[in-house]
């Protein structure tokens, strides 16, 4: 996997916070319940799952490198 070498260098706490904020904004602006459900998934996600979610949402993971 592309991130396997660098995944320990990711600031997962910050990534989780930003994903929660992203889904919170989506929830308020247009998707309602779907944004809330995605936000809940991020709160409970493992580090691997966070990477997958961030990739799906086109987050620049270089921004989260320590």
Image (cartoon, rainbow, N blue to C red):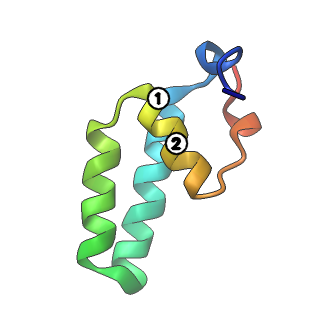
Which one is in front, 36 or 4?
A: 4
Identify the residue under disc 2: 52
Query: Where is residue 17, by image quadrant?
Result: top left
Q: Residue furthest front?
A: 1
For the point 29% across and 49% down, which residue is it?
41
Quarter of the image with the N terminus is top right
Query: Where is residue 10, by image quadrant?
Result: top right
Between the C-alphas of marks 1 and 2, the distance is 6 Å
Secondary structure of residue under mark 2: helix
20 left or right of 34 in image: right
For the point 33% across and 59% down, which residue is it?
38
For the point 41% across and 63% down, which residue is it?
23
Quarter of the image with the C terminus is top right
Q: Position of residue 29 (x, y in %)?
A: 41, 83
Identify the residue under disc 1: 48
Q: Residue furthest bottom?
A: 30
* Label 2 Cα crowd, 10 Å radius (few <14 / some 14-19 / many 20+): few
Which one is in front, 54 or 17?
A: 54
58 left or right of 11 in image: right
> Does the residue at mark 1 contact the one at mark 2 (Cβ under 8 Å)?
yes
């Amino acid at each position: 996997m592309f991130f396997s070498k660098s995944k320990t260098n990711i600031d997962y706490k910050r990534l989780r916070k930003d994903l929660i904020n992203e889904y919170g904004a989506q929830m308020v602006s247009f998707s309602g319940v779907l944004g809330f459900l995605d936000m809940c998934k991020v709160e409970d996600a493992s580090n691997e799952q966070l990477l997958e979610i961030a990739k799906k949402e086109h987050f620049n993971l270089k921004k989260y490198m320590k």
